[in-house]
Amino acid sequence: MSPFKRYGVFITAALIGVAVAVVLMLNVVYPRESGVLRMAVLDITAFMDRAIRLPINNLQHIWERYIFLVGLGEENRRLKKQNAELMSLLGRYREGYQERLRLQELLALRDSLKYHTVAARVVGNDRRSVLRTIIIDRGASHGVKRGHPVINERGVVGRVIETSWHASRVLLITDANSNVDCIFEDNRLQGVLQGSGGTTCTVKYITKTEDVKVGEKVLTAGYSGIFPKGHLLGTVAKTDKNESGLFQRIEVKPVVDFVRLEEVLVLVFEG
Amino acid sequence: MFYLFMPLAMLLLVIFQHTVLTALTLNLIFLEFSLAMVVYAGFRLGIVKGAMTTIVLGFFMDCIVGTVTGYYMFIYYIIFCFSFVVSPLIYTEGGWAVGVCVFLAGCIEVALLILMTYGIYGANVVFDLPGGFVPQLVVVSFLGPLVFHVLDRLPVRFSRI
């Protein structure tokens, strides 16, 4: 019996294994835009997700609209009061904004990033697999490209990592692979916000000598050229200076509720 | 016939588990039936058919999850090899044996996911990943014998015999 016949199964298995490893290595070393097949699978998945979620979302809305009407009067009074407070606050902020525009013009400063927004609906929410991602129903045909930031009315959601023709995949800021340049609102300290893979994020590279308060807001710093400056990322939930090393551990709770995420805005850069 | 229907069946399986099952479990758990399918391929299909099934399944998982192409292909292929090697030693008509194999395969998957996520993406998920994976692994291990039962009775003959 020839060696190939005797060890044929093992040789075949080894050859296939080497081929798979080569495919993986090539894709890691030379990352490329998604191929047609990947884009097609993403499009089909987004379509299926949308079709399945539609009745579920409708049921949810019915529940929220009719069952939770109890207590609406109380909530209405609270919201009216809050609205009055916010209107007063808005007036003061408007003044500040006008002043900022005048100063900006005086100093000839320009926002380095010009963009417009594309509204998108979340059709898939994949928070349980190795990458924390969502799928949105806007893709390359709507001008969305890899790297574009995604926000909602509360703050930063993540960035686009893959697009197909009619859908895109967004890496959430809570994913362990996500890194965003950030700045603390009050003390102007700069760091990098990294996802923890769970529901929170951590800010890296803040030395133990710095004082960071719980509840302080964390904003995008706008250095990397991906996220525009000043978008809200989250608030400091916990600080720990007892960790080994030079830096303290700062845990940040994102402002975006990723469980109830329904609509988002993609910031599409011009030029 | 096998190579004609297999990619379509694998695509449907991956989409089904990602959309329908995730919606049914209210996004609380990701039932990875594809893992049971890989173990099945190791037990019931030959080296070539099984490897092709595994690689195609891995590719579709890469597309769905958003990982770099080859990531799940490699993980699933390692699990396939494990199943293929242990298959002559295990009597799979007993449901518990299949369940144990799927559980062990899942443990290998978690270990590889942690190692490869660190190696490729540079992210340490050693404390976050197992917590999310263990519940789904237990559920899939319990449902593994059912997957074997269904696949053994499919009209398109998957068996190597």
Image: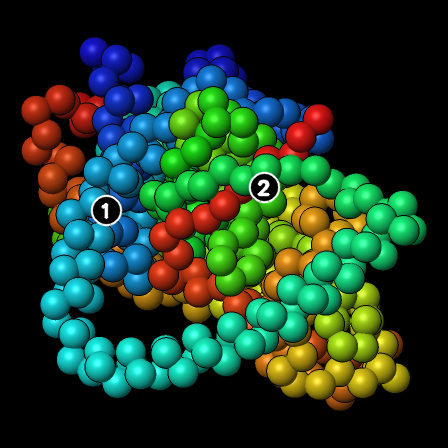
Chain letter behind tag 2: A
Using the rendered image of the protein, determine whether residue A271 is visible from the camera's viewpoint.
yes
Rendered image quadrant of residue A194: bottom right
- The front one of A63 and A100 is A100
Q: Residue at x 50, y 38 (%)?
A: A118
- The answer to whether residue B4 is above or below residue A224 is above
- Locate residue A132 relative to residue A193 in the image: left or right: left
Q: Residue at x 59, y 37 (%)?
A: A116
- The front one of B117 and B141 is B117
Chain letter behind tag 1: A
Q: Position of residue A67 (x, y in %)?
A: 12, 72
Nearer the observer, disc 2 or disc 1?
2
Q: Residue at x 26, y 35 (%)?
A: A48
- Locate residue A203 relative to residue B115 in the image: left or right: right
Q: Residue at x 89, y 45 (%)?
A: A108
* Numbered mark located on residue A267 in the image: 2
Q: Quadrant of the N terminus of chain A?
A: top left
Q: Position of residue B27 (x, y in %)?
A: 30, 57
Using the rendered image of the protein, determine whether residue B59 is visible from the camera's viewpoint.
no
Residue type, numbered disc 1: Arg
Q: What residue is shown with label 1?
A: A53
Q: Quadrant of the C terminus of chain A?
A: top right
